[in-house]
Image: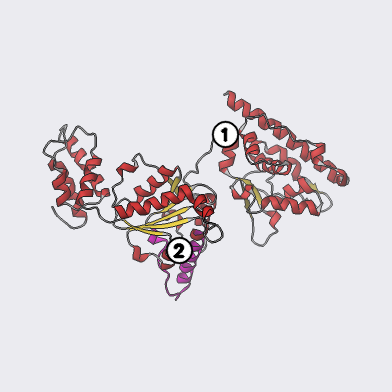
Amino acid sequence: MLTESFNTAALEQEIAWFSQVCDARFDAYFKHNEQDIDLETVCPAPDLTVQDSPYAKLVRELEMNYAERIVLMLALMPHVRPQVLDLFSLQNSALGRAYSEIGGWRGKSHIGFLPTCETASFILAGSHLAKRFAVARLFKDEHFFIHQGILKLEQQSAGEPFFDAALQLSHEYLQRLADGEEHKPDFSANFPAKLMQTQLNWSDLVLNTEVMDEVQNIVTWLKQSPYIVGHWSLGKTLKPGYRTMFYGPPGTGKTLTASLIGKVVGADVYRIDLSMVVSKYIGETEKNLANVFDQAQNKNWILFFDEADSLFGKRTQASSSNDRHANQEISYLLQRVEDFPGVVILATNLKANIDAAFSRRFQSEVYFAMPDPQQREKLWRNLFAGSAHLAPEIDFTEIAERYELAGGALLNVARYAAIRAVRYERQLITQDDLLAGIGRELMKDGKTL
């Protein structure tokens, strides 16, 4: 509670300062003496060097200057004190409309003023053209506002002036300024991706030597890419991202491997929900993908596309508008994947269905084969490691030799065997329970024990 009160007090101080800045700009602008105004002199910014609030920490972390603090507060204001911006809804009595130099836009339900880049320019520059150009630099892609995803600029309609873009604070940084915590994005229509987590560890992953070697290459890149690029002066020729394809039969560990890579390097792994990405409407698939890539652009995330052939499939001869649209989607995907500075993992059971243009741009293609008998035995033993509820007659060596199953199928067998033992009120899982579960899994492929 003390922390919350402390943060509130810090924001109240900054809001009061921001209000003074706005009043000073309006007073100078409409009294036509803005040539003489120096906002930093008239309304000096509060000293944040000794404050420990989330807002102060962010300002110090990014070494924000006076103008940057004003822009950040402007974007924050609709969320914390919308009435402060009511002043910007002033109408030009001579023209019977809002002042174009103030900018702003209206939300669908929010009745208050919502700022645009034009609003920021009005506060910081007034009618000074040189200062206006300086404000524009705050919204360039390389500025931390955009580069780190703090602000989002959204054009309301195509072809309108750049400064008419809505100035929006990202949800992530809104939460950070509110309570000091870094929130991970939630699965939604605007972010069709789910954070992947696992309780398993690297020792639970059973892969052959060749596959593990390729996986270690990815881990090394994630941990050492700045050194790899810098030590050999490859920054001008190598793109910062890493793209790889995991392919092979279902249940062979592709998803688990992606999760463990993220776990071992401390990176979040997001699984893209393709059912919410792909749309039959022209332009919607690209828009949905843009939402994911834009939010992930400058974060330490791994993007995992499961069943990727449904989205990254081969281009076809364009004999209809639908074919042309599908090919455009793939071309757009190719561009976004290639330009993404993080790691992208495509997983598929059918490599042949992936467009060759993606394969050519991948740093690696990793084949996850069905486990051999020795690997299957290790999987069986890992699965029941530490369990005291196995009948003594269970022979994992024999089961592993006789029945070719992937790791995913083994999980199904273990679940079924445990259910069967409980149903028959037994304290031990027997060999028969495992065989019954194995039989169910084999039947899925049209096989029998």
Q: Which residue is drawn at 31% across and 58% down?
A: 248
In the rendered structure, which segment of residues is drawn in magenta?
308-336
In the displayed structure image, the side of residue 360 where residue 61 appears, left or right: right
| Residue 118 belongs to magenta span | no
Q: Where is residue 179 in the image (x, y as percent from the top left)?
A: 57, 33
Specify how the rendered protein is coloured. secondary structure
Camera-side residue of 345 and 423: 345
Q: What is the number of the mark on residue 180? A: 1
Residue 424 is at least partly visible in this image:
yes
Give the farthest residue toward the left.
393
Residue located beneath label 2 in the image = 361
**Residue 281 visible in the shown view:** no
Query: Where in the figure is residue 424, as x and y percent of width and height?
Result: 15, 35
Residue at left offset 58%, top offset 41%? 173
Outermost residue toward the front? 232
| Distance between the alpha carbons at the discs numbered 2 and 1 | 39 Å
Q: How many marks?
A: 2
| Vertical side of 8 occupied by 374: above or below | below
